[in-house]
Every structure is written in structure tokens, then in C-alpha cells.
Amino acid sequence: MNLQPIHLPGVEERRPLVIAGPCSAETEEQVMHTATQLAASGVKIFRAGIWKPRTKPGGFEGIGSEGLAWLRRVRSELGMYVATEVATAKHVEAALAADIDMLWIGARTSANPFAMQELADALQGVDIPVWVKNPVNPDLELWIGGMERLNRAGITRLGAIHRGFGTYGQTLYRNPPQWNIPLELRRRHPALPILCDPSHIGGRRELIAPLCQQAMDLSFDGLIIESHCRPDAAWSDASQQVTPLQLSHLLKELIIRDTTPSAERLTLLRKQIDECDEGIIHELARRMSVAREIGQFKREHAVTVYQSSRYNEILEQRALQGEQHDMSSDFVKKIFEAIHEESVRQQIEIINGKRS
């Protein structure tokens, strides 16, 4: 990709670049109150969603073009750069007409090549910074392809936003980070700036600070964080927004390391181990859930808990599968012996009425 640095007069060129503001622009008073507090804490780039693609109908889907005037007021009165999300050509047209300084494209939009091409056509020949969030699904090629469409349309001040990836079932994070994917993006396109969106990754404000630190430890260029003057009263994504004061404290506590390549590589590998371990715990929990359903079936049909033939079959099959992945059969058997023991324990509790 043909890329140019995203230089903004008045914004220091050091890590982390910080973009902050509410998930949604709700009222003019809310926008100005939040922006005033953020500006006082040193934030130079204000973000607010004007058009909000919601997962289900009936929720707040954004104030619409009316909010663009509020963003212009933030810029004129507070001297901040302003940014908003666009998802259609009409959004782009309205944002450009309002002289919005910076645009980003959301995860649902970046997953759709037709939508990305529509936006690329609407931005043809325009010199404006554009950030692209990763698609909801963990597809690096789709993410890169969307940015390439914009780049071919002449957008050279281009950046990526890592906001985590959708998953099924409960996990620690709203959108698990899968750090290896943005880091592979960095390896392929080292000139491409990458921001981390800890708000959407974490989904809960108490996770934002550690996620920010992880992003800095992995040499991300900046952070885009949702901040609201009254987070608990927010019209969208209340649980993942912080106050401007909380954001200020968070940023002051960040440790920015200039890591050597070897140390950076070790950090990456450790993060991958952490992600694998989290995935193992998630899958074990899912397996135990199925085991409990089996226990309930056995209780209702008076079937014994321990089935030796099934147990032996599991051990032999898993041992063979382990060998195919360069693991010793003894190691794999020990793991599944422990898993089976826990499954039996939970099923016995169900049969004895100690667990529902």
C-alpha cells in the first residue's frame, strides 16, 4: 500500500496517539461537556458516533447529521480535531461537507467488500485520514483488502483500528483481542499505524486500563477510547465508557517502553500463550457444560455415570490425535484423565441433586 504518515499540526508525534470521546453523540450539551473535559486533560482528537449500526433494531441508532454541527462546535470552540464513523456514501458526503477532520469505518462495514468499495468510491481523490476497524470475524485478508480498496482510491493517510473479534459464548472480553492478527498486519505493513480500541475489546471499563497497557507493550501506535461525561447514563455501550477524569488517570499510569526487537518478540509469544490458555479454559467450560447435560440425562434415565468403554475410547482416540500434533500420547492421556475425572465429579453431583 502507498501510505503517508498521519501528521496533525498541534498533535505530538509520540506514542500513544489518543482519540477519545463518547460512543454516541447524544445531545449538544453532552458532546460539549465531554469534549471540554477531554480537552482540559490534553486530548487533541475528539471522537463521537453520529450514525450507529446496532446489532438489533430498536436501540439508539445515532442522532444523525444533526450531530455534525456539534462536532464542528467542538473544533471551533476547543481547537480539537474531530472524528466520526461512516458506513455509507451518504455518510461520507455529509461528513466531508461538515469538514470533519478524520473518519473511521466500523467492524460491520469493513466485513463487507461491497460497502468498502462504496466508501472508497465516495472518498475518491479526498485527502483525509481514514481509520479502518478490523472486521467482526478474525479475517486478516478481509481487513487488508478493505484498506487496499481505500488506498487505491487515493487515501494514503490510512490507519487500522484493532477492536477485537466476535466470538460465541461467554469470555473475559466482549471481543477477544487475538493479538496475533494485528501483529501479523504490522509485520506485513510496518508503515501502517495501528490503534487499539480497548473499549470494544473489553466491553467493561475495568478492563480498559490493562488492555491499553497490553497495546503499548505490543508497540501499538495509539488508542481510541470511549469516554463520556456521565458513562452510566450513556445511550449506548454504557459499561465500556470511562469519564474524562478516569481516562486522564489511565493515560498517566501507562508505561511506554521502547522495546528491543528480541524483547518485543518475546512479549508477542507470551501474549499468544495467554490467548491459547484463555481459549483452553473457554473450551473446557463448554465441554463441562455438555458433560453436565449428559449427567442430567443419566439421572433422568437411571444410567450409571461411569462408562468404561467410552472412557477407554476417548483416551485412545485423543492420544492418537495428540501424536499427530507432535505431543506424546502419555501427556495427552494425562490431560484427558484429569478432564474425565472432573466430568465424572460434576455428573455425580447432578445425579445426587447437589448441582442443577
Image: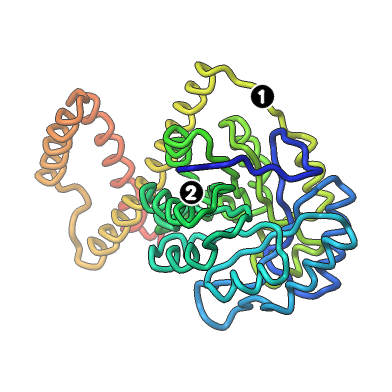
What residue sits 82% from the left and 69% below the top? 30
Q: Residue furthest toward the bottom?
A: 58
**Picture quadrant where residue 75 is located:** bottom right
Across and down, in percent, residue 291 comes to 29, 54
Residue nearest the observer in this picture, 249 or 35: 35
The vertical placement of 297 against 280, above or below, is: below
Locate the C terminus by quadrant.
Answer: bottom left
Residue type pointed to by label 1: Arg
Q: Is residue 222 left or right of residue 338?
A: right
Secondary structure type for disc 2: loop
Across and down, in percent, residue 260 comes to 57, 17
Residue corresponding to mark 1: 257
Secondary structure type for disc 1: loop
Residue type pointed to by label 2: Pro
**Picture quadrant where residue 184 is located:** top left
How many neighbours does mark 1 have within 10 angstroms: few (below 14), some (14-19), or many (20 or more)?
few
The vertical placement of 328 against 115, above or below, is: above
Q: Is residue 27 left or right of residue 127?
A: right
What residue sits 74% from the left and 54% below the top? 242
Residue corresponding to mark 2: 176
Locate the N terminus by quadrant.
Answer: top left
Nearer-N-terminus badge (1/2)? 2
The answer to whether residue 18 is visible is yes
Across and down, in percent, residue 97 comes to 69, 71
Residue nearest the observer in this picture, 338 or 131: 131
Q: CA distance from mark 1 to mark 2?
A: 24 Å
